Amino acid sequence: MNANIPLLSTSSKPSNPDNAGITFFRLHPTTKQITTEIERLGDLHAIYSNCNCDPYESAEFLDSLQKKHQNGVAIGGPLWSLQTFNNIVGDKSEGSLFVVPAPEPMLENIASRFVVQYKTSYPEGPDPSWFALHAYESIHLIVNTIQATEALTSKSFAETLSEIDYHGPIGRVQFDSVGKWIEPQLKVYKWKNATKSLP
C-alpha cells in the first residue's frame, strides 16, 4: 500500500517495508517480542513453551505434554487467550499460560474505567477481553495524535504519531523509526477452570 495514508495496525506487519515508520505503525508486539517473553518465562519457571498459532496443533502439544509430564505447564501467545482456543483444547488448557499485549480488563484494576464504559454501552454483551481494550486504546492513541497535530494532513499525522509518547491502560506507547511499538507491556494470564485468571 503506497497511498500515504497513515495506518495504525493492531495485528499485522506492513506489506511494504518501505512504509514502516513512515505511514505504517504497529500497535502490536512483534513475533520476536512475544517469543522472547515466552522463552524468558519458560527459562524462569521451567515451563514448556509453544507459540503455535494453530489451535489444533496446540491441542496436540498440550495432550502430549500432559501425557509425558503430569504437572507440565505450557505457555503460548495471544491466540491462546481466545475462548475459541479453550473450547478447542478443552480441559487440556487447564493451567496453561498465555502472553498478550494488553491487560485483561476483567482481571486488572488499571482497566476499571474502560470496563465501566464498556458495560454501560453494552450491558447485555459479553465481558470485554484484552482485544476490546486494545482497540479502545488504539482509538485513544489516534485521537491524541489528531489533537497534537497542528495542521492535520496525512504526513503531519504520521509525523506526530512517530513522536507520540502515550500512557494508558495498555502501558506506554512509543514507536521506533520503523513504526514498531518500542516496549509493549506484555501480560501473562492462565486458564483455570475454563476461565482466564491471574497466574
Image (cartoon, rainbow, N blue to C red):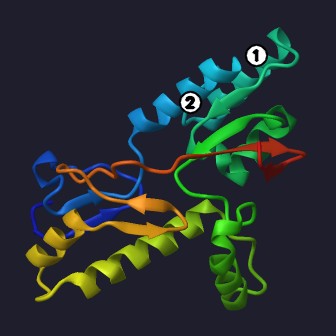
Q: Is residue 51 visible in this depiction of the protein?
A: no
Task: Look at the numbered disc 2 and give the secondary structure of its residue.
Answer: helix
- The amino acid beneath tag 2 is Ile
- Residue 48 against residue 36 in the figure, above or below: above
Say above or below: 62 vs 137: above
Instruction: Say above or below: 65 vs 24.
Output: above
As measured in the structure, the alpha-carbon distance from the residue carrying label 2 to the one carrying label 1 is: 19 Å
Q: Which mark is residue 83?
A: none
For the residue carrying disc 1, how many other residues have a C-alpha within 10 Å: few (<14), some (14-19), or many (20+)?
few
Q: Which residue is mark 1?
A: 64
Q: Position of residue 36 (x, y in %)?
A: 47, 29
Q: Is residue 58 left or right of residue 176?
A: right
| Residue at (85% x, 48% y) in the render | 194
Q: Quadrant of residue 96?
A: top right
Q: From the top left corner, tell me how far across and down residue 156 is, in percent.
A: 11, 77
Q: Residue placed at 74% from the left, 25% from the top? A: 62
Of residue 170 and residue 62, the one placed in the foreground of this image is 170
Q: Quadrant of residue 113?
A: bottom right
Return the x and y of residue 127 as percentages of the image width and height. 74, 71
Is there any visible trace of residue 18 in the rendered image? yes
The percent coordinates of residue 50 (x first, y second) are 60, 26
Furthest-top residue in this view = 68
SS for dot 1:
helix
Q: Count up the numbered dots.
A: 2
Work out which quarter of the rendered image holds the C terminus and state it: top right
Query: Please, what is the three-letter code of the amino acid marked with disc 1?
Result: Ser
| Residue where numbered disc 2 is placed | 38
Q: Tell me if mark 2 has few (under 14), some (14-19) or many (20+) residues whose alpha carbon lies within 10 angstroms of its own.
A: many
Q: In the rendered structure, which disc, 2 or 1, sits on the residue that comes first in sequence?
A: 2
At 24% from the left and 83% from the top, the residue drawn is: 148
